[in-house]
Image (cartoon, rainbow, N blue to C red):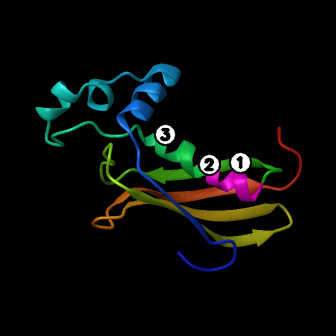
Amino acid sequence: MTGPAAFTLDWTPTQAEFDAFAQVSGDDNPIHVDPAFSARTRFGRTVSHGMLLYAKVWGLIRSRFPVGRQVAQTLVFAHPTFAGEPVRIEVAEIGRDAAGIRLAVAVRRIADGASGLAGEALFAWGESQ
C-alpha cells in the first residue's frame, strides 16, 4: 500500500495471543486454541481469530490517529493467519474530507503475500466516544 498516511507494522502472532484473545472474547473455538484438534483440520494448525487481526490493525491506526472514532468497517478474511508465521499489517489513506478519513487495511502473510484480512475503515475526526 502506498499513498498519504500509509504505514505498516510487522508482527508474528503467537499461540499465547490466540489463547489470550479467546479468553477475553469468549471465542474459544478449537480451531484457534487447540493444536491437537487443529492438526486434524484442513489448516493443519491453529489459526488466528479474525478480530484479533483487526485489533492489531486498530492499534496501528490509533497509534497514528489517537483522537477520533471508528464509524464503520468492512472486512474480509480470505486466508488463514497462523501462529508463528510473520505478517505485515498495512494501513493506507484512500480518502479524506471534513468528516474523516477512509483507510484501506490489510494483514498479509509475509512468506507468500496471502491476505488474512482486507477491507476498509471509516475513521471520524474529533473526540473519541
Residue 58 — which label?
A: 2
Can residue 63 be found in the magenta stretch?
Answer: yes
Examine the rendered structure and indicate whether residue 28 appears above or below residue 127: above
Query: What is the C-alpha distance between the residues marked 1 and 2?
Result: 9 Å
Specify the amino acid type for callout 3.
Answer: Met
Dominant secondary-structure state across the stretch colored magenta: helix
- Please tell me how crowded label 1 is: few (under 14), some (14-19), or many (20+) other residues with Cα within 10 Å: some
Left/right of residue 12 with respect to residue 35 in the rendered view: right
Can you give x and y, in whole percent of width and height, for residue 28 in the image?
Answer: 37, 21
Q: Is mark 1 on a helix, strand or loop?
A: strand
Specify the amino acid type for callout 2.
Answer: Trp
Say which residue appears at 31% left-offset and 26% top-offset: 33
Q: Mark 1 points at which residue?
A: 70
Residue 125 lies in what quarter of the image? bottom right
User: Which mark is first along the chain, 2 or 1?
Assistant: 2
Specify the amino acid type for callout 1.
Answer: Gln
User: Which mark is first along the chain, 3 or 2?
Assistant: 3
Q: State which mark lies toward you, 3 or 1.
A: 3
Left/right of residue 114 with respect to residue 52 in the rendered view: left
Can you give x and y, in whole percent of width and height, for residue 116 in the image?
Answer: 37, 54
Say which residue appears at 31% left-offset and 63% top-offset: 114
Look at the image and give the residue range highlighted in magenta: 58-65
Which one is in front, 82 or 54?
82
* Disc 2 + disc 3, Cβ < 8 Å: no
* Disc 1 + disc 2, Cβ < 8 Å: yes
User: Which mark is first along the chain, 1 or 3?
Assistant: 3
